[in-house]
Image: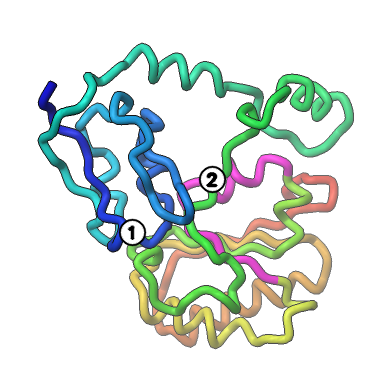
Amino acid sequence: MIRRIIKINEEKCIGCGLCADACHEGAIGMVNGKAKLLREDYCDGLGDCLPACPTGAISFEEKEAPAYDEKAVLAAKLSKEMPSPCSCHGSACQSIQASANTESDSVPSCLSNFPVQIKLVPSISPWFKNADLLISADCTAYAYGNFHQDFIQGKVTLIGCPKLDAVQYADKLAQIFRSNPIRSITVTRMTVPCCGGLSHAVEAARTQSGKDIPMRIITIAPDGKIV
């Protein structure tokens, strides 16, 4: 049958994965760093992925394609459902491990950009357009079990360790804030004193940029609790 489905221009695709996150049907996936329409019968033709693409790589086309299979989409979603990850406290994590018997049952990543290291990310990128930015100390993702769902999801993620990285974050971050329309900043850090360097760098960068970007700082203890 002839119907409307999406078309992805691979040359324009930067591999950010935002379209895959926006596709509620699971029709889009990432293959070798590029977005691909994996299942034409999963594409409903509504185009929720179009506004998510920062480079305009997605468009509609009318073509011969299988009909949208809503039952198959729902079945695929149900097959992937499992409990949310937890901070590792023995029996709770064991129950998750028991339910994830195959690789396909693993909890999906919420990461929408790569690279993520502050010293590696470009200062100007389509990722940053109207972005909610997460700036995270390395250790926080290991201490807080539900980090992807509670913090990374829906945000552009930057990570670093002020104690181990031999760089000054403030100047790089100020350039990012100054050059891009950042909507908000969330900082996650550990309770340890060295993580204070990350918070101070973000605050200094915010001042240097001359932009009053809304900002919040969340501190996490080694046992995964927010303090």
Label 1, on which residue?
Answer: 13
Q: Residue at x 82, y 71 (%)?
A: 193
Q: Residue at x 10, y 26 (%)?
A: 2
Amino acid type, callout 1: Cys
> x%, y% of residue 48?
27, 39
* Residue projecting furthest to the right: 90
130 to 227, vertically: above or below: below
Question: The N terminus is located in which quarter?
Answer: top left
* Span of residues in magenta: 145-160
Q: Nearer the viewer, residue 32 or 90?
A: 32
Residue 73: name its quadrant: top left
Amino acid type, callout 2: Cys
Q: Nearer the viewer, residue 213 or 107?
A: 107
Q: How is the image coloured?
A: rainbow
* Residue projecting furthest to the front: 64
Residue 28: name its quadrant: top left
For mark 2, does the 10 Å Cα neighbourhood hold few (<14), some (14 to 19), or many (20 or more) residues?
Answer: many
Q: Nearer the viewer, residue 74 or 33?
A: 33
Q: Secondary structure at mark 1?
A: loop
Sequence-wise, which precedes: disc 2 or disc 1? Answer: 1
> x%, y% of residue 198?
67, 73
62 to 105, vertically: above or below: below
Q: Secondary structure at mark 2?
A: loop
> x%, y% of residue 155?
48, 54
> x%, y% of residue 56?
23, 57
Residue 153 among magenta residues:
yes
Label 2, on which residue?
Answer: 110
